[in-house]
Amino acid sequence: MRFSTLAVHAGQRPDPCTGAVCVPVSLTSTFAMDGIGKLRGDFEYARSDNPSRHALETSIAAIEYGKHALAFASGQAASTAVLDLLEPDDEIVATPNIYGGTYRLFHNVYNKYNIKINVAKNSTPDEIKKALTPNTAIVWGESPSNPLLELFDIAETAEHVHKFHNKKNNKPILVIDNTFPSPALQNPLLLGADIVTHSCTKYIGGHSDVIAGAVVVNDDTIYERLKFYQNAAGAVPEPFSCFLLQRGIRTLPLRMKKHEENAYKIAEFLRNNAAVEQVFFPGFTDFPNYELVKKQMRGLPGMVSFKIHGNIENVKKLFAGLKLIILAESLGGPETLICHPATMTHAALPESERKKIGITDNLIRLSAGVEDAEDLIDDLKEALQNIKK
Ligand SMILES: *Cc1c(COP(=O)(O)O)cnc(C)c1O
């Protein structure tokens, strides 16, 4: 089946008991048994599994073209589950541009297990390959990255990573955080990645009303380990969150088209505005790695980043002048959001690290919603007047 059909139907068939077309929210913590060791249905205790989460996991696995999916209470809980595959003294290779919270998890949580992070010089497959060490157990990347929208060749990276053997004679696991493109625009497992993670809080949920995450994997052994961890650690989403995510998934392909359309219009407008120094948008034919958009993606998410002339004072002026666009963390919702990565999404990075990867104080990230692009552009135009020299 094709993507939009899967988005509507996978894991979302009518309820066999009642015929309900939407998967009912299964609000129960436990399930009656018919005797010791005799489950009445498929479920025993809701943390271990429940109908709402099971349906959501079926749906996410299908739209990511993976064999298994596991849902978590947040994107960070999903990332933590993957990092729990590591043993003390294992190492991670990461692309330089990753979500600030992932950076914090690597450096400020897992460092106590003596897990070292080797950041590749840049995200080309060659530099990622050079960063591999005899202890590398996980290679972690984001494409397009948060917030600079850097792309790297996932298939070529997977090839390098899988040719390598660490000192335990294992191939490192290639993990792609696919939050930005969403499953509608890019499917890393089809490109050779081993694990896909999502912050479902963003495009998958799509309505800025739920925090959740997911992990998708093909390998049965890795799946069993993650499934064990999911139940043992227990950072699972509530059934109502699962319901909201499934509701979001049904319109994911439709929404992504509108986000993309608005992002193109906004990026084009920004590029021609005198107050703007630089626009980061992979839809521009002169954007670095533009050819990878065609090679590994089916379209672009609604993300546009840009630098304005001047310093943080001008950023403040711009934000103060916005009447429609909302200053807030997060992305992927129906409303257009704007944020200041240096003090918000990427505040966990030391200033020197931020500078090194290009997150300067005049950098702004915008998540185009699904409003009328003309209203968004009018709002930006007026706010940018505040800072025109
Ligand atoms: C938001 C985000 C996360 C973290 O997800 P939460 O749901 O907020 O825990 C991870 N990766 C990326 C790329 C994100 O944008």
Image (spheres, rainbow, N blue to C red):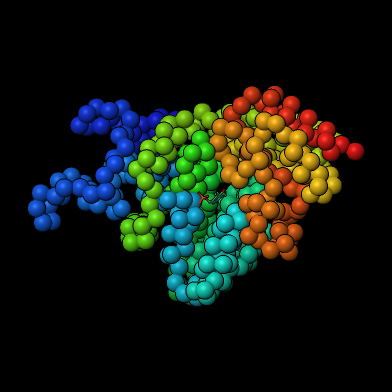
Tell me the residue at 70%/24% (across/down): 374
Residue 365 falls left or right of residue 63: right
Q: Position of residue 173 (x, y in %)?
A: 48, 61
Q: Compared with residue 255, is residue 168 higher up or lower down, i.e. above or below?
A: below
Question: In front: 45, or 6?
Answer: 45
Q: Compared with residue 333, is residue 87 higher up or lower down, i.e. above or below?
A: below
Residue 131 visible, this orientation: yes
Residue 112 falls left or right of residue 218: right
Residue 345 falls left or right of residue 190: right
Image quarter in which the N terminus is found: top left
Tell me the residue at 36%/31% (across/down): 9
Residue 345 falls left or right of residue 158: right
Q: Compared with residue 111, is residue 199 higher up or lower down, i.e. above or below?
A: above
Residue 295 visible, this orientation: no
Q: Position of residue 229 (x, y in %)?
A: 36, 61
Question: In front: 286, or 105?
Answer: 105
> Residue 290 falls in which quadrant of the image?
top right
Q: Position of residue 63 (x, y in %)?
A: 43, 39
Q: Position of residue 315 (x, y in %)?
A: 77, 44
> Residue 309 falls in which quadrant of the image?
top right
Tell me the residue at 41%/37% (across/down): 244
